[in-house]
Structures are given as structure tokens and as C-alpha cells.
């Protein structure tokens, strides 16, 4: 079957055909870098990492852009409140750009450990202020936006199709805006900011035709997506919570500016729950990746995420995570046995498993069914390996190719047991946690010689330590 993607815009599975044959343009909303990455980030970016990997497996060249929001995302989606990064900088008594840089590095360290391949282009909002100003000015010129007291707002009434992605009615949008106590300078409560006037003391601000200010949250994605991928892109991904207002606003400002369709396939991943309850800081059930990696290997987290479909909620519990660890261990054991097997004379039929895996992934990237196929394959494999005749050299090569291609390259859930000296992931994590604990005690006892020796020896082994308010974290260079 051909690849079909559930398109949030059409609300059905559509057969995928790229705008340019052989090339896929893909944009995914990146993190707002004012804190460490959490399990919700992991679900989103692992899911879209597999989307990218599968497209590449099908032979496409994927141009993947994922932004970093380092300014402009206010604490309220209706253009009110405080910039999240500026607020965090005040709490940490430092500069907003230092906050953004620190948590950007932290984000990439976590994604690297999860096996998420980095995007082709990772643009920042602060690095594309001219493009956002140009987009805003173009919309003002075309009558889709207006300036009031140094701020620029998009006129939602000028774009009749506003709401088609989310299904939100005009009345719902108006009520949402009214609840946020929007400024009277807006013509309508549902209008959204393209550019905001910087109040006195606002650190992150730039010159513009309307005075000093900073971009609205929604402007950056349109400006950067169109700069690097063109006026119409194939796939735009993000969390379901971004469907309204963020993605709705992206469509409006982009299509009003260019007169062309902005995105052909909209993809949205579902949220993370904890024991059936929505994850959130206010509920004190927030799961930070830095914390969970101290107890569970990143590979297990990745496997746990892929056992649920990207459009389904991911319910976290210790029991579910332990079950995922057990399941992954069984796959790894079969893979290790396959890698160490000596040739015999038996055969095994791989084609049906290849077809089942392919059909699952072509059905809107159905990773749970794809993983179930891997378990069925390893059961058949184990039976053949333990049979008297074993498997022939050709059969072993076919099985290894199947696992390397689908479990390794596509899903990214295989360790390579043939690599000597790399060490078990969980063992390495346990050793690092012990070293960090010893170093912390040494510092508390003012034994700085021991503390520095541990740090320097780790640096020599290409392992970096980062001391922060939440404790010490580590990452490979």
C-alpha cells in the first residue's frame, strides 16, 4: 500500500505525494527554550524523527527544519503576559539569551540521547527578526494587518478561512480572546500579534518600522518555514495543543501573505498523561527527561514512546515503563543471538514480515503495529536459531538486514552488540550517577581536588558535566 498520512486539515488519511518528486519539505515546531525538555517533548520529537526516517527509507530526500523559540512566546496564547524566557531569566537572575542558550544545549543533549537525529536546519527566532518584520510589513501593506501604538496585529476578519484547521468557530475564538482580557487596541479580541511594542525595561527588543519591539510568537514559524522550504511545504508537524491558536495563525498569516496554500499535510501528535492525568507543572506530575534518564535508559524511553501511535495519548506509569523495558530487552536478546549465531543450513521467510512492517508504517506511521511485527519476527527467529539445523549464512544475513533496517535505521531502537567497549547504556548511566554523587559530596566537604579530578578525567573521556540549580547533569561531547 502507498504511504497515507492522517491530515489534520482534511481530517482523513490522504495518500502522500510530495510537491516536488523525490523531495519532502518538512517543518516541525521546536521547543521554547526556558526549561529542560520533558516527556511531552520526547513524544513529539521521537515521533517526527521516525516520520523522517521512514520517508528517507522510502527513498525521499527529506529537508527537515525545526525551529528554536528563543523569544516572543508569551505566558498567554492571546498575546498577553510575560515572555517565558525573560521570566525565567529573572528567576535565575541572568540574561534571557543565556537562558535560551543553556536550555537549547540541554534540549539537544536530551534529544541526542534519545536517538533523535538533528534537523537539517535549526533556525532561531532571534536570528530571523528581519524576516518576521518583512512578513508583518507585507501583511500591513495588503490590508491583513494593522499597527496600533507600535504593535502590529493580524486582522482575523480579513481571512475568512480562519479556523478551518482546528474547527474552532469565530465565536469560540472571540470568547477565547475575551477571556484573556485583551487590550482595547485590538480591533477584535481574536486578532493576534505579529509584532509587539517593547515596554520600558524589556530586554529583548529590536528596531522595526513601528518602533522598538519584538515578534509575536506565531510569526517566527511562518517566516522561517517559508524562507527555507518555500511558500508551500509538504508536512508541518507539532503537538495537538498547537493546533489552536498557533497553527491556525500560521495558516492565516502565511496564506494571506503569499496567496498560496501554506501546508499540504498537517500532522499533530497527541499529549502525554501520567496515570491517566494530563501532565503539567501545576499538577506536580511533570516528568523532566534529565530526571527520568537517571533511572531509565533513553533507549527504553524511545521504545516506550513508539509503542503508542503518535496520534494517541501516551500514558506514563512506572509499570508501563517497566513493561517496555522488558519488551525491549527481549528484542535486544534476539538481536544479540542473531549477531552471534554461526551458520547452519536452515531457512526463514522474511518477506512477509517486511511487507507487514511496511504496511504498518505506510498506514500513517503505525509504530505499535510495526513493533508487534518485530516481536512476531523474533519469535520465528528464535525458533529457527534453536532448531538443530540453525540458519544458513544467507538466511542469517537476511535476518540481520531486516533487523538493522527496520528496528535499527527506521525505529532507532537497537543497540549494536558487535561494538566492543561501548558498555551497556544503563550500566554507564548508573556509573555516571555514582560519580556525580561522589563529586557532589566532595564539593560539599570542600574537597575540591577530588571534585576537579573527577571532572577532568571525565572531560578526557569526552564526557561533560554541567552544574546547575537542579543538580549536575552529564552528556557525551
Image: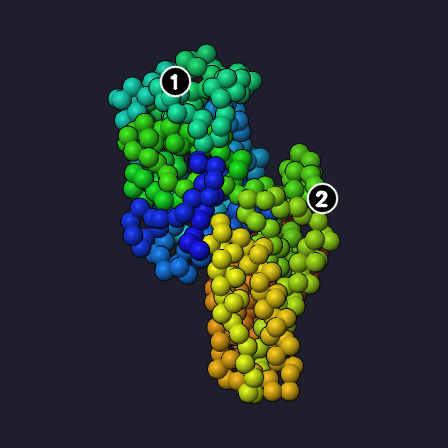
* Figure label count: 2
- Residue at x-position 34% and y-position 48%: 18
Residue 66 at x, y percent in the picture: 42, 46
- Residue at x-position 63% and y-position 71%: 379
Instruction: Give the residue at mark 1.
Output: 157
Q: Which of 476 and 41 is in front in this view?
A: 41
Residue 336 sits in which quadrant?
A: bottom right
- Say what secondary structure mark 2 lies in: loop
Q: Is residue 424 left or right of residue 28?
A: right
Q: Can residue 28 be seen in this view?
A: no
- Residue at x-position 52% and y-position 56%: 360
Q: Which of 172 and 98 is in front in this view?
A: 172
Residue 422 vs 343, above or below: the answer is: above
Q: In this view, does 297 lie to the left or right of 130?
A: right
Instruction: Give the residue at mark 2.
Output: 275
Q: Check the picture and name the quadrant holding the N terminus.
A: bottom left
Give the Cα separation between the discs numbered 2 and 1: 42 Å
- Which is nearer the N-term, disc 2 or disc 1? 1
Amino acid at each position: 500500500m502507498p504511504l497515507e498520512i492522517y491530515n489534520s486539515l482534511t481530517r482523513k488519511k490522504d495518500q502522500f505525494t510530495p510537491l516536488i518528486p523525490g523531495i519532502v519539505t518538512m517543518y516541525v515546531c521546536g521547543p521554547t527554550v526556558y526549561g529542560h525538555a520533558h516527556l511531552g517533548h520526547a513524544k513529539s520529537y521521537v515521533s517526527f524523527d521516525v516520520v523522517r526516517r521512514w520517508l528517507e527509507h522510502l527513498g525521499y530526500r527529506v529537508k527537515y527544519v525545526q525551529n528554536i523559540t528563543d523569544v516572543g512566546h508569551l505566558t498567554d496564547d492571546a498575546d498577553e503576559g510575560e515572555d517565558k524566557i525573560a521570566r525565567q531569566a529573572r528567576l535565575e537572575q541572568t540574561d534571557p539569551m543565556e537562558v535560551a542558550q543553556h536550555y537549547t544545549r540541554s534540549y539537544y543533549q536530551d534529544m541526542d540521547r534519545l536517538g533523535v537525529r538533528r534537523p537539517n536546519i535549526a533556525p532561531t527566532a532571534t536570528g530571523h527578526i528581519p524576516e518576521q518584520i518583512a512578513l508583518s510589513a507585507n501583511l500591513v501593506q495588503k490590508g491583513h494587518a494593522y499597527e496600533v501604538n507600535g504593535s502590529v496585529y493580524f486582522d482575523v476578519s480579513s481571512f475568512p478561512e480562519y479556523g478551518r484547521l482546528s474547527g474552532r468557530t469565530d465565536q469560540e475564538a472571540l470568547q477565547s480572546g475575551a477571556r484573556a482580557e485583551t487590550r482595547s487596541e485590538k480591533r477584535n479580541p481574536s486578532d493576534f500579534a505579529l509584532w509587539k511594542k517593547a515596554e520600558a525595561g524589556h530586554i529583548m527588543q529590536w528596531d522595526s518600522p513601528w518602533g522598538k519591539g519584538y515578534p509575536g510568537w506565531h510569526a517566527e514559524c511562518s517566516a522561517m518555514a517559508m524562507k527555507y522550504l518555500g511558500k508551500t511545504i509538504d508536512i508541518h508537524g507539532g503537538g495537538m495543543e498547537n493546533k489552536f491558536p498557533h497553527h491556525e495563525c500560521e495558516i492565516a498569516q502565511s496564506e494571506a501573505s503569499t496567496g498560496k496554500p501554506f501546508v499540504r499535510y498537517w500532522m499533530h501528535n497527541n499529549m502525554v498523561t501520567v496515570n491517566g492525568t494530563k501532565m503539567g507543572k501545576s499538577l506536580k506530575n511533570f516528568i523532566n527527561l534529565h530526571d527520568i534518564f537517571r533511572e531509565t535508559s533513553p533507549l527504553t524511553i524511545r521504545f516506550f514512546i513508539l509503542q503508542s501511535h503518535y496520534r494517541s495519548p501516551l500514558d506514563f506509569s512506572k509499570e508501563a515503563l517497566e513493561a517496555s523495558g522488558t519488551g525491549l530487552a527481549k528484542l535486544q536478546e534476539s538481536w544479540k543471538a542473531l549477531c552471534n549465531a554461526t551458520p547452519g543450513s536452515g531457512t526463514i521467510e522474511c518477506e512477509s514480515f517486511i511487507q507487514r512492517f511496511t504496511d504498518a508504517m505506510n498506514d500513517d506511521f503505525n509504530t505499535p503495529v510495526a513493533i508487534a511485527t518485530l516481536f512476531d519476527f523474533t519469535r520465528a527467529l528464535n525458533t529457527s536459531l534453536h532448531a538443530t539445523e540453525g540458519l544458513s549464512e544467507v538466511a542469517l544475513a537476511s535476518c540481520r538486514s531486516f533487523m538493522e533496517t527496520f528496528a535499527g535505521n527506521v525505529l532507532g531502537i537497537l543497540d549494536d552488540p558487535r561494538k566492543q567497549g561501548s558498555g551497556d547504556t544503563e550500566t554507564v548511566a548508573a556509573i555516571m550517577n555514582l560519580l556525580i554523587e561522589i563529586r557532589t559530596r566532595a564539593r560539599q566537604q570542600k574537597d575540591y581536588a577530588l571534585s576537579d579530578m573527577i571532572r577532568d578525567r571525565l572531560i578526557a573521556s569526552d564526557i561533560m558535566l554541567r552544574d546547575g540549580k537542579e543538580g549536575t547533569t552529564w552528556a557525551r561531547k
